[in-house]
Image (tube, rainbow, N blue to C red):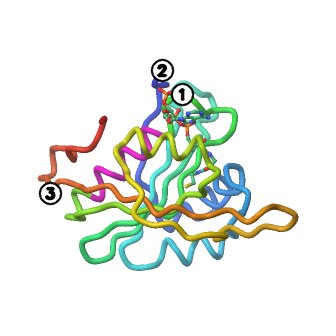
Amino acid sequence: MIPAIRIEQVGLAHTRVLATLHAACLDDPWSAAAMADVLASPGAFACVAVPVDSSDAAPAGFALARLAADEAELLSLGVIPSARRRGIGQALLDDVIRSASRLKARALFLEVAESNDPARLLYAAKGFSAVGRRPDYYQRANTVPVAALTLRLTLRQVGVDTGPDDVGT
Ligand SMILES: CC(C)(COP(=O)(O)OP(=O)(O)OC[C@H]1O[C@@H](n2cnc3c(N)ncnc32)[C@H](O)[C@@H]1OP(=O)(O)O)[C@@H](O)C(=O)NCCC(=O)NCCS
């Protein structure tokens, strides 16, 4: 079920919010300074998912991406553990796909750990396909190295009011 959330575009002014969300969602937290560097880089764009029926309205997830020439890259995506499996990750990804299409990107790329089944299932449901594999890419203390998969989604060139053909597949 899609919960009552709204997706808001955010930027440098939301560095701390994004860094806090990143730390809550992923194993390798980025500092606020690192997040600010990414947000300040050319072509960067970000969004958060805000519950509309929550009294504190704290964001439950985020997505961070970057446009370079006619390609976009999803740099990070996360939903806080207590809000997962309610369609928020999908809504954030849809928003990134729409934004990248509006920015005239022809494709959206991302990297995902081969062991990350939830994320891989989400991306597969959106139509991403693997175009590369880097063995032992993710190396964390006391864990077996994990390969990174590079995934790609072709985006249709669209006007402002329509979505890419891959959305919802
Ligand atoms: C990956 C992540 C963003 C998914 O967010 P989410 O809000 O839970 O995902 P959604 O509820 O929108 O799920 C959409 C679809 O993805 C798939 N999916 C997501 N999580 C899944 C899980 N735990 N098990 C199986 N399928 C899953 C399903 O196909 C799901 O559709 P369904 O619920 O109709 O079956 C979230 O698990 C997360 O933040 N993980 C930690 C950070 C991370 O791995 N980020 C990605 C880095 S590349």
Q: CA distance from mark 2 to mark 1?
A: 6 Å
Local SS, label 1: loop
The amino acid pointed to by label 3 is: Gln
Residue, disc 3: 157
Q: Position of residue 142 (x, y in %)?
A: 87, 64
Lower sequence index among marks 2 and 1: 2
Question: Which residue is the extreme one toward the left?
Answer: 159
Magenta-drawn stretch, dominant element (helix, strand or loop): helix
- Which residue shows up at 70% across the image and 70% down it? 31
Which numbered disc covers residue 1? 2
State which region is magenta: 90-100
Q: Image quadrant of ligand 1?
A: top right
- Which residue shows up at 29% across the image and 59% down it? 100
Lower sequence index among marks 1 and 3: 1
Local crowd at mark 3 within 10 Å, few (<14), some, or many (≥20)? some
Of the pair 113 and 30, the residue shown nearer to us = 113
Local crowd at mark 2 within 10 Å, few (<14), some, or many (≥20)? few
Left or right side of 14 for 102: left
Of the pair 55 and 25, the residue shown nearer to us = 25
- Which residue shows up at 45% across the image and 52% down it? 47
Residue, disc 1: 86
The amino acid pointed to by label 1 is: Arg
The question of residue 103 being in magenta is answered with: no
Kindly indicate whether the residue at mark 1 contacts the one at mark 2 (C-beta within 8 angstroms): yes
